[in-house]
Amino acid sequence: MQTDQKSLLCPELKLYKKGKVREVYDFDDKLLIVATDSISAFDVVLPSLIPGKGGLLNKISNFWFDFSKDMIKNHIISAEIADFPGECAKYNEILKDRSVLVWKTEMVEMEAIVRGYLSGSGYKDYLKSGAICGIKLPPGLKESAKLEEPLFTPSTKAETGHDMNIDEQELRKVIDGAIVDTIKEKSLQLYKTAADYALSKGIIIADTKFEFGLLNGEIILIDEVLTPDSSRFWPADEYMPGQSQQSYDKQIIRNYLSTLDWDKTPPGPQLPEEIIRNTLAKYEEVYQKLSS
Ligand SMILES: Nc1ncnc2c1ncn2[C@@H]1O[C@H](COP(=O)(O)OP(=O)(O)OP(=O)(O)O)[C@@H](O)[C@H]1O
Ligand SMILES: [Mg+2]
């Protein structure tokens, strides 16, 4: 993606990568990951901001990094602006609450997806082939059904366009088998522990995507963890298999967008104040529920 330097939150820092809703800055052996207040719907970044969203996403991710730190090492150095490199100081007001300083790792080029429920591309693959990533499932499962056991359904990290689900056997041809073994074991353990915990707080984490990197030869957890941006969060008290579920965080926006005549291609429409306010409240609710 071509990035206009001036459009960045910190235009004078060295950009490492800009995604849809995060900006990553380069500090040699470290990275600064900054969650913006942007929001995407149907893969389109909307022109409206949700002020406070980036900070909440960052808090949710940091909550899980802390929650899982005895299961697996992670990339976090600090979430405190006082610990950030000196060049960041002029952006302190912007960076506060929404940023983490992390170790730069050599990325393992895969998305470690775990699914506890049948939804999204997993459900589509199941309808077509009765399987996800080569894992056969029993016939007759409904959309959004809870799976007997969570599945590890990795995908390749595509530079452009959509990531592709990949058979574990195929994955082992491109990524070292011992690395795949560790990532699979850790991903399933992380998902199961976190999903049980979240369910006790009224949130279903239907599926999620982890990323891992190598630091001094060790596999560690990187990127963001178990946020509504990297996972499907559903309100547990509205769960109803046999249909698609309401999204915990984006349903308000999706419902609003469905009232418009918008074809889901950029540019997306502006959001009314009320929709912005109610959406932010959902992110606050998720953080409060998880951290209480
Ligand atoms: N500790 C780390 N070491 C190396 N790379 C990292 C680390 N943590 C995160 N990354 C990488 O930083 C990038 C963050 O980009 P981001 O997720 O915002 O955008 P994206 O994945 O390109 O697109 P999208 O907006 O669709 O998610 C990812 O490529 C991620 O793999
Ligand atoms: Mg990403």
Image (cartoon, grey):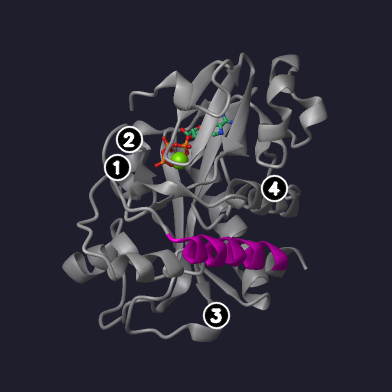
Amino acid type, residue under disc 2 in the picture: Lys
- Vertical comparison of 272 with 160: above or below: below
**Marks 1 and 4, how far apart at CA:** 33 Å
Residue 186 appears in view? yes
Q: Quadrant of the C terminus?
A: bottom right
Cβ of disc 4 within 8 Å of ligand 1? no
For disc 1, the neighbor class at 10 Å (few under 14, some 14 to 19, many from 20) is few
Q: Quadrant of the N terminus?
A: top left
Amino acid type, residue under disc 1 in the picture: Glu
**Label whose residue precedes the other's in the sequence (2 or 4):** 4
> Which region of the structure is painted magenta?
272-288
Question: Residue at 34% across / 76% down in the picture?
Answer: 244
Q: Position of residue 23 (x, y in %)?
A: 52, 32
- Circle 3 sits on which residue? 236
- Is 40 colored magenta in this rendering? no
Q: Position of residue 214 (x, y in %)?
A: 57, 28
Question: Residue at 61% across / 65% down in the picture?
Answer: 281
Mark 3 or mark 1, which is nearer to you? 3
Q: Are marks 1 and 2 in contact (CB under 8 Å)?
A: yes
**Marks 3 and 1, how far apart at CA:** 35 Å
Cβ of disc 2 within 8 Å of ligand 1? no
**Label ID, residue 62:** 4
In this rendered view, identify the residue nearer to me: 222 or 78.
78
- Circle 2 sits on which residue? 173
